[in-house]
Image (spheres, rainbow, N blue to C red):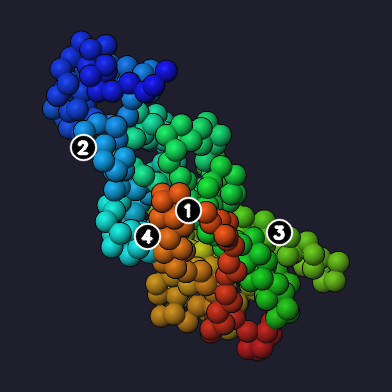
Amino acid sequence: MGKADIYEVARAAGVSISTVSRAFTRPELVSAKTRRKVLDIADKLDFNISRSATALKSGRTNRVAMLMNEEITSWFNTQTFAGIESVMHPAGYDISLFQHIDTERNRDEFFTDLPIRRNVDAVFVASFAIDPHEVEQLRRIHVPIIGINTPSVDGFDASISIDDEKGMYTATQHLINLGHRHIVYPCSEASLLNSSIDARTRGFIRACEDAQGKHDLNWQVLSVPRGPAFADSALSALLALDEFPDAICCQMDMMAIPLVIKLGRYGHITPRDYSIVGFDDSPNADTINLTTMRQDPYAMGRTAATKALKLIEGEPLTNAHEVVEAQFVPRGTDMPFGGAQ
């Protein structure tokens, strides 16, 4: 049986063709009850708006979606978006942003409505995993899914990521090689969304466990609640320790930078009293001379967009899933243990 057209949907819903069109393209002009009825019938009949007269010629919407688990204002998301836009905009595509897909309501709304409306030609997912049901919803309408620094490639047609675990392993190993033996890792609590950043914690733990047999290490993971106050929570946790560490390995620069500044107010000066290493090489890392691990979300966004264009065109990818290494950036917030004595 062939897919239904807009006339069949209108007839089954008992509304006009223009009402069906508005339910998809101008939902604010249709009552919530009528729109829900139209969308439910469209889903049952396997109708999507891309088959309407506005898109019959190309079958495309010239729009892509970017899903993120935070606000677009975060450094990673802003740079990723800029990279995607630099490729997709010249190719004639608009980008729809979906923030806070980490909430159940937002995820359900996106993955339920999209297969009905079919209003994007590709979906970019930044930093988190998607489950099999969500993958199936997109597979139904043949929309390619491209991951950007996702914790897994499962369900994705293509991806570009850094090895977060290996990067943090390198950062931790650097501090151990400098002679530090009391090392603390402040981080935000693991997310139910399975975010790529959580792999960094595994890298820290693995580096400490691997070195445990050779050195008498005293290491600890300090988990604090996620949210706007996570850096202040990490500060409080560090100051509450019975003994202040001689090295701090931070989950991200956005935690390391405020810690360097605020710990100084309590008399803990880096690198005189402790070494600290961040992760990301985000804005202001260079300003405070922070030693860190560098990733390039702008470049990853461009790579992901290039893969998306090929998938939209039906072209094969020679390297669908790529992993790049974070680069160690030595600056001035670390030194050999006892070197300042």
Q: Earlier in the sequence, mark 4 or mark 3?
A: 4
Residue at mark 2 to residue at mark 3: CA–CA distance: 54 Å
Amino acid beneath label 4: Ile
| In front of the other: 202 or 232 | 202
Residue at 66% x, 71% y is 170
Residue at mark 2 to residue at mark 4: CA–CA distance: 25 Å
Image location of residue 206, percent across then percent down: 73, 60
SS type, badge 1: loop
Residue at mark 4 to residue at mark 1: CA–CA distance: 19 Å
Residue at mark 4 to residue at mark 3: CA–CA distance: 33 Å
SS type, badge 2: loop
Disc 1 designates what residue? Answer: 315
Q: Earlier in the sequence, mark 4 or mark 1?
A: 4
SS type, badge 3: helix
Image location of residue 81, percent across then percent down: 36, 59
Disc 2 designates what residue? Answer: 54
Assess disc 2: are there few (<14), some (14-19) or many (≥20) residues with their C-alpha within 10 Å of its C-alpha. Answer: few
Q: Earlier in the sequence, mark 2 or mark 3?
A: 2
Q: Nearer the viewer, mark 4 or mark 1?
A: 1
Residue at 51% x, 64% y is 252
| In front of the other: 7 or 77 | 7
Assess disc 3: are there few (<14), some (14-19) or many (≥20) residues with their C-alpha within 10 Å of its C-alpha. Answer: some
Residue 127 is at least partly visible in this image: no
Disc 3 designates what residue? Answer: 205
Quadrant location of the C terminus in the rendered image:
bottom right
Amino acid beneath label 2: Thr
